Image (cartoon, grey):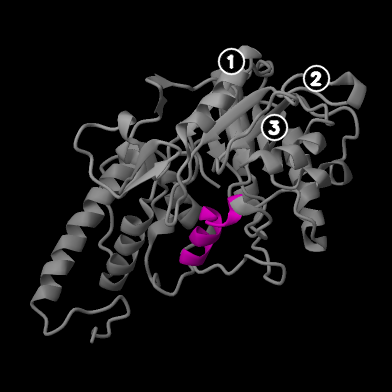
Amino acid sequence: MAKNSSIEWTHHTFNPWWGCIKVSPACQHCYAETFAKRTGNEVWGPNAPRRFFGEDYWNNPIKWDKQANMDGVRRRVFCASMADVFEDRDDLEEWRGKLWELIEKTPNLDWLLLTKRPENIGDMIPWPTDWPENIWLGTTVENQKYADERLPHLLQHKATVRFLSCEPMLGPVDLEKWIKPNQEKGLEGIDWVIGGGESGPGARPMHPDWARTIRDQAQSAGIPFHFKQWGKWAPVDHLPPGTKGTKTVINGVEMTLLKSKKSVDRSLDGIIWDEFPNSYPVRENTSEKPKEEETTPPDDGVFPVFPEHSIAAFLNLYREWEMTLDEFNEITDASRLTHPDFPGISLPTLEIHDNEKFDRFLTTFYQQAVAYGKSLAKAEGIKKADGTKRR
């Protein structure tokens, strides 16, 4: 769970559980699986257990809903960044039912249910015809093969919004036959299109024409288009002059492998595409202002002194993962730092909920890490996170 998510097209993320199974090429470099393993959770695969969470975690969307009501502004919740809500497993039925109840209790939150298993939707939802108006139903479409396989399943449902996540985009996609309603086949139309390239280790490049095609088709049909990112590869003509990195050519377009997806902005042909579907208004404000949470984030930016082994391990995780506030909260709120590299660290008590405080935390942490590094330099050998010497 993460309040104030770093994902560009949502405000919050919520995971009824952690864990999944890879089902298509888009899953090959699954960031969620990598992230789970880095935090000590082996929850991927058909025989692996799933990880579930307690009532404190499940109460957070209730707080978000009350705040949205008070603010008079709806909030979007991505569900799920660390799982697939429509995975078919017996041990998920209870938790899926709990999720449906939560969605109905939070009418001021728009729940973005994104799946790679749209064929399971009809058998798993409790609303055969009358969907709650706060559900946006989406499927991943990484290439034409999966557009043709998944869209007939998605578009048969009368959710308020039906959307596509063409990310990671691994090939060209033609949406022409799917973009408008087809009454003859009993299919609804597409309400929103998201596009983007792949990030993380082993990322595969996205040809800019693939993104342009879905953008142009969406625009022609009057459908909102959101360009999330280029990912780790970007076309040279979208980069500042002199940008370094491994080069490759895809169908005549030179692409550069970047150190970070943040090395390039999210523009496509000079425009930041941040379009969203229209949403229902918030409910009439009849609730009291939410009470302050029991643990209020400190305002002075003072953080505890971290154990040396935790500094080494956590700094390594931050550097390798380009950690964001979203991912930081996934660790502190959900997994409670159960990874063996983190014994004794007190991060869950920090309650960091805004990017400014997260930046201050990283600054403090980095300063302690530098001091730790200097102390290591005086030692006979460089120590590993567990205190043993490297050979």
Q: Nearer the viewer, residue 178 or 314?
A: 178
For disc 1, the marked residue is 219
**Which image quarter: residue 341?**
bottom left
- The secondary structure type at the circle numbered 3 is loop
Give how far apart the Cα atoms at labels 3 and 1 are: 32 Å
Q: Nearer the viewer, residue 330 or 23?
A: 23
**Which image quarter: residue 381?**
bottom left
Q: Position of residue 113 (x, y in %)?
A: 69, 39
**Which image quarter: residue 128?**
top right
> What is the span of residues highlighted in magenta in the rendered image?
26-38
Residue plotted at (56% across, 28% down): 67
Q: Residues within 10 Å of mark 1 (few under 14, many from 20)?
A: few
- The secondary structure type at the circle numbered 2 is loop
Mark 3 or mark 2: whose residue is earlier in sequence: 3
Q: Residues within 10 Å of mark 3 (few under 14, many from 20)?
A: many
For disc 2, the marked residue is 181
On the rendered structure, is 325 left or right of 247? right
